[in-house]
């Protein structure tokens, strides 16, 4: 049986989050510029989106640019932003055809104007799509997001529209950029790094973590299937004991 055929549809993660890592190293191994790695990574984005939609995954989040990535050389940042605009424009037809809704989380106001406006236009054009949410994390970091949420909650308390005793886990979740999306159940990180790197720290509380040595531009559908199968073989106990889960 192929890897895809072994996947149990009823046990699919509702939300898969991916830290796409290793583009720079992939390019370096080939004696090319880092930007070549990012460009090549777009094929892996396409494969992953397509595979998730085919399987019936409801939400896919791709960590495309972190708050910390603003510290990279200007040349690389400009190239990544350009690539983002080109890719969004190129793929919008495919998103429409496949009923995929594009969403974005992060400090989007920090993106170059053109990049943000193209992004907003694609989000608007796909807003009625139902098959899958494709969420791009752009200029995103979890500590930034949590800080924003805390500020907003504090302001509400100051205005007396909220009381301290109203603060619950659900309330905090509702102030995050992911308020409309279920928490990721599976996190995949490529390139052999075993870190979360400031990504969805609150939302990842119970996520299963899957690390692969593959560099992002080499990541293909079969790699996604392997990650999902690994996820399906795990026992998710949420603090309970094995016997309780089985009962
Ligand atoms: C990490 O590799 C990758 C990124 C910072 C950018 C990912 C972007 C893409 C795959 C292209 C476009 C994406 C979309 C959604 C349109 P790295 O540069 O950190 O690699 P390294 O760790 O080997 O240096």
Image (cartoon, rainbow, N blue to C red):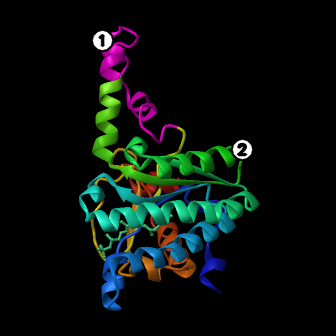
Q: Taking 219 as reference, is 168 left or right?
A: left
Between 171 and 109, the residue placed more toward the observer is: 109
Q: Position of residue 153 (x, y in %)?
A: 34, 23
Between 34 and 63, the residue placed more toward the observer is: 34
Marks 1 and 2, Cα distance to the nearest angstrom? 36 Å
Q: Residue furthest bottom?
A: 30
Does the closest atom of ligand 1 sit within 8 Å of the Cβ of label 2? no
Q: Position of residue 197 (x, y in %)?
A: 28, 58
How crowded pointer 2 is (Cα within 10 Å; few <14, some 14-19, many 20+) is rated as few
Bounds of the magenta segment: 153-179
Residue 165 colored in magenta in the image = yes
Q: Position of residue 119 (x, y in %)?
A: 54, 50
Residue positioned 28% across, 44% down in the render: 143
Dot 1 corresponds to which residue?
158
- Ligand 1 falls in which quarter? bottom left
Look at the numbered disc 1 and give the secondary structure of its residue: helix
Dot 2 corresponds to which residue?
128
The reply to whether residue 207 is in sight is yes
Look at the numbered disc 2 and give the secondary structure of its residue: loop
Q: Position of residue 170 (x, y in %)?
A: 43, 31
| Of the image marks 1 and 2, the number of the one nearer the N terminus | 2
In the rendered image, the quadrant that contains the N terminus is bottom right
Compared with 102, 6 (above or below) is below
The reply to whether residue 191 is in sight is no
Q: Quadrant of residue 100?
A: bottom right
Residue 144 bears which disc, if any? none
């Amino acid at each position: 049986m192929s890897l895809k055929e072994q996947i149990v549809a009823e046990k699919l993660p509702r939300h898969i989050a991916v830290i796409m890592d290793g583009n720079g190293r992939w390019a370096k191994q080939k004696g090319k510029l880092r930007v070549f790695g990012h460009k090549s990574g777009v094929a892996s984005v396409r494969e992953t989106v397509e595979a998730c939609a085919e399987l019936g995954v409801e939400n896919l989040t791709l960590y495309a640019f972190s708050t910390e990535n603003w510290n990279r050389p200007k040349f690389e940042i400009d190239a990544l932003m350009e690539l983002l605009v080109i890719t969004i424009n190129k793929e919008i037809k495919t998103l429409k055809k496949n009923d995929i809704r594009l969403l974005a989380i992060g400090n989007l106001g920090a993106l170059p104007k053109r990049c943000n406006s193209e992004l907003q236009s694609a989000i608007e054009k796909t807003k009625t799509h139902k098959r899958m949410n494709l969420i791009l994390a752009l200029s995103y970091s979890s500590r930034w997001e949590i800080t924003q949420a805390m500020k907003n909650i504090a302001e509400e308390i100051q205005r007396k529209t909220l009381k301290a005793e109203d603060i619950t886990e659900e309330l905090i979740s509702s102030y995050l950029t992911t308020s409309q999306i279920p928490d990721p159940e599976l996190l995949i990180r490529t390139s052999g790094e075993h870190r979360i790197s400031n990504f969805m720290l609150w939302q990842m509380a119970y996520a299963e973590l899957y690390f692969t040595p593959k560099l992002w531009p080499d990541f293909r559908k079969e790699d996604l299937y392997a990650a999902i199968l690994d996820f399906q073989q795990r026992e998710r106990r949420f603090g309970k004991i094995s016997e309780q889960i089985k009962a």
